[in-house]
Image (cartoon, rainbow, N blue to C red):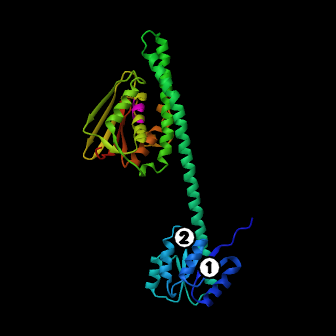
Amino acid sequence: MMTPLPNILVIDDSPESLELMKHVLSPDHRVRLAVNGEAGMALARQTPPDIILLDVLMPGLDGYETCRRLKQDLDLVDVPVIFITAMEAAEDEATGFAVGAVDYITKPISPPLLRARVSTHLALYRQRRAAEQARAKAEEAACAKTEFLSMMSHEIKTPLSIISAAAELLQRFPDNPEDTRIEAGKISKAALRMQLMIEALLADDLLDTSVLVTSRPPVDMAKLVGDLCNERRTSYPNHELHMEIKGQPIVDGVFPLLRVAVANLLDNAAKYSPSGRPVHLRLAERCGTVSLSVQDQGMGIAEEDKERIFQKFFRSERSSHKSGTGLGLYLVRRIAEGHHGQITLESQIDQGSTFTLSLPAGRQP
């Protein structure tokens, strides 16, 4: 299949200039001619050109006004316009660029210069269009991926919630043998791990979209943290979850992402704390900042790992015996930074760690 010739529209009231430009460009381009601004705009709207060569001094609608009107048309706004003029003053060129031109060619026209300028701007125009088409395809693919992950998440979470509820009943029923309750606890923790993996995948996908620059409604962090603690108490029966709240901690943010961040901090604290040791959560709003500190009494984090633990898929040697994906703290940092906040760490070996999530306070609902 032959590639169509570039479509060039020449608008000039001089028959000599029209014929010259057609003669110079015709072998490699499809050239259409118009003798005034009104006729040129009609041809452009009929079939949008790849480039427009436009005379400045024309009776009636001059080149500047013609260019202004072309740039107001959504179908023509991106078409490059090169002014053809005998005027060489700097203020004339400034006016042309201000109304949307990309270049100037002065009369008398030099055929080699005309071919070179047209070739250059055609190449730039095609590159820009190709980039826009590629971006549109990428956005379409990203939307399809998000929809697929959301659908799969829903389909998986429904049976997971049934499994978790059944396991919780088996744990609580007093007449069940001890080994049954132990196995039910294992089922409950396995279901929770799968839920965390699903939420992590969705969060990672959301962070790659424009969700953080669109809607950010107020999120009640006290309710979010409280609900998570209530949900996790059955999954971590060997840890007491102590929660302390001060002020009215509201942030403007994306609720699913904030939930993932808090859930990862809470689950890490419970996972790495010895059985019987409490996990402390302190949530406060002070001086325009909402901070959540999650403190455990676990193995602690080595100095050389304190920055690396926020890297994607990183897992330290000391934590290799624990299950995990290496995504949790990476997502916490990305979510914090996406909300114009930060995550900090204080830790000592064999004494525990404290992660503090700090976010700008939001408007009260």
Name the main secondary structure of what is drawn in magenta. helix
Q: Amino acid at mark 2?
A: Leu
* Image position of 115 with respect to 168: above or below: below
Residue at figure coordinates x 37%, y 21% from the top left: 276
User: Would you say residue 266 sits in the magenta stretch?
Assistant: yes
Is 74 placed left or right of 229 in the picture? right
Secondary element type, mark 1:
helix
As drawn, the label of residue 76 is 2
Residue 23 in the image, given as x and y percentages of width and height:
68, 85
Question: Visible in this render: residue 114?
Answer: yes
Name the residue that disc number 1 marks: 116
Circle 2: element type: loop
Q: Amino acid at mark 1?
A: Ala
| Left or right of 215 on screen, residue 75 | right
User: Tag 1 or tag 2, which sits nearer the N-term?
Assistant: 2
> In the image, residue 256 lies at what x, y percent?
43, 40
The disc at residue 311 is none
Asked if residue 88 is positioned above or below residue 8 in the image, the reply reads below
How many residues crowd around disc 2 within 10 Å: few (fewer than 14), some, or many (20 or more)? some
Which residue occupies the foreground of this view, 176 or 8?
8
Numbered range of the magenta stretch: 264-269
Query: Horizontal placement of 270 versus 21: left or right?
Result: left
